[in-house]
Amino acid sequence: MLSSSIIKLVGAPIEIGTSEPGAVMGPAALRTAGLVRVLQDLGHTVHDLGELSPDGTLGQRTLSAIRAWTTEISSMVETALDEGHLPVVVGGDHSLSLGSIDGALRHCARTGRPLFVLWLDAHADFNTLETSPSGNVHGMPLAALCGEPGFEALFEAGERPLLDPARVHLFGLRSIDAGERALVTQRQVNIVDMRTIDEFGVVAPLRRILDRVAAANGHLHASFDVDFLDPTIAPGVGTTVPGGATFREAHLIMEMLCDSGLVGSLDVVELNPFLDERGRSARVLVELVASLFGRRIIDRPTEVPPLET
Ligand SMILES: NC(=[NH2+])NCCC[C@H](N)C(=O)O
Ligand SMILES: [Mn+2]
Ligand SMILES: [Mn+2]
């Protein structure tokens, strides 16, 4: 992350992409846990745009109701990036990434830089309307962004830049539906699943991804789903899956992303304060965001300390 960036923060209290109510309170809980203050204390300027509330979507769980969110989030992210700022969208369910990634794609289409997505999530979120067992749109945003058919109603009419599935990196995957498993394989989505992390840790697989983005002079969009974390440290999410990233692994990932300087836009999604335990998950998320934006334990490059002889 840049040493002092201008961060454009916006809350997207959307929950119509899921069947579990409560994510609507996510932005408020992250603010209560000190999100803005933590970023300012690290020396960043935060332009807080408040909470989005697109018209006419209350309670409706249709693709066109989600389009109202997609459109607003997309233009906010695109504008922030055009101005050279770093957009942070806090949710809200994962369907908000339809907007943030669409906005980043539109920006990148102008700059010519390729867009890479790091999807930190227990799930692939690559279902289509056909493969989805739940019908919940928060399980579909990547498929829609990559141009799978059936999602036209989620976006404004007209041409839109598509996400290249070969530039999507799923990280932390441990729950996938049968149809979406076939689809991510067919589309050549890159996957670091929990099995890989068990074997190799987070450092080697993440470094490969970062090297790839750096070599391509790419823009990296990071999308952080709370359920990437193990439910013992972050219970406040509607779709917990056991066996997630530990506290240490998650911080190390954030620190590596920070050191890389490659992250150009960020989502923090799926926090459900109604399911949380006294704000624990919200606090963990704010701490992780702090690591991503430059907080370190001590100020020197990491190295193995020399042995005393
Ligand atoms: N963003 C999420 N939490 N997605 C969970 C998706 C779960 C499941 N694969 C579904 O499509 O319904
Ligand atoms: Mn997700
Ligand atoms: Mn998930």
Image (cartoon, grey):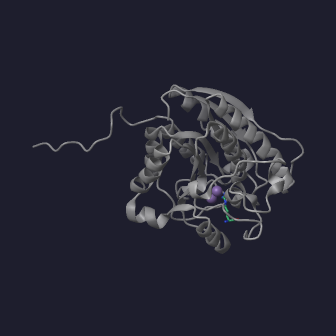
Q: Position of residue 45 (x, y in %)?
A: 58, 25
The residue at the far left in this view is: 309
Total tally of numbered discs in the picture = 0
Q: Position of residue 183 (x, y in %)?
A: 64, 69
Q: Quadrant of ligand 1?
A: bottom right
Q: Nearer the viewer, residue 290 or 75?
A: 75
Q: Position of residue 202 (x, y in %)?
A: 43, 55
Left or right, 263 with reference to 51: left
In which quarter of the view is residue 227 placed? bottom right
- Residue 77 placement (x, y as % from top left): 69, 37
Question: In this image, 25 relative to 301: left or right?
Answer: right
Farthest residue, direction right: 56
105 with respect to 52 (left or right): left
- Asked which quadrant contains residue 145, the reply is bottom right
Inspect this view and state whether residue 20 appears: no
Q: Residue at x 61, y 69 (%)?
A: 186
Tell me what residue is drawn at x 77 percent, y 63 percent.
Answer: 149
Q: Residue furthest bottom?
A: 178
Check the picture and name the quadrant holding the C terminus: top left
Q: Residue at x 50, y 47 (%)?
A: 213
> Vertical placement of 136 versus 221: above or below?
below
Residue drawn at x 67%, y 54% as measured from the top left: 275
Residue 195 appears anywhere in the view: yes
User: Is 223 left, or right, of 256 in this rendering?
Assistant: right
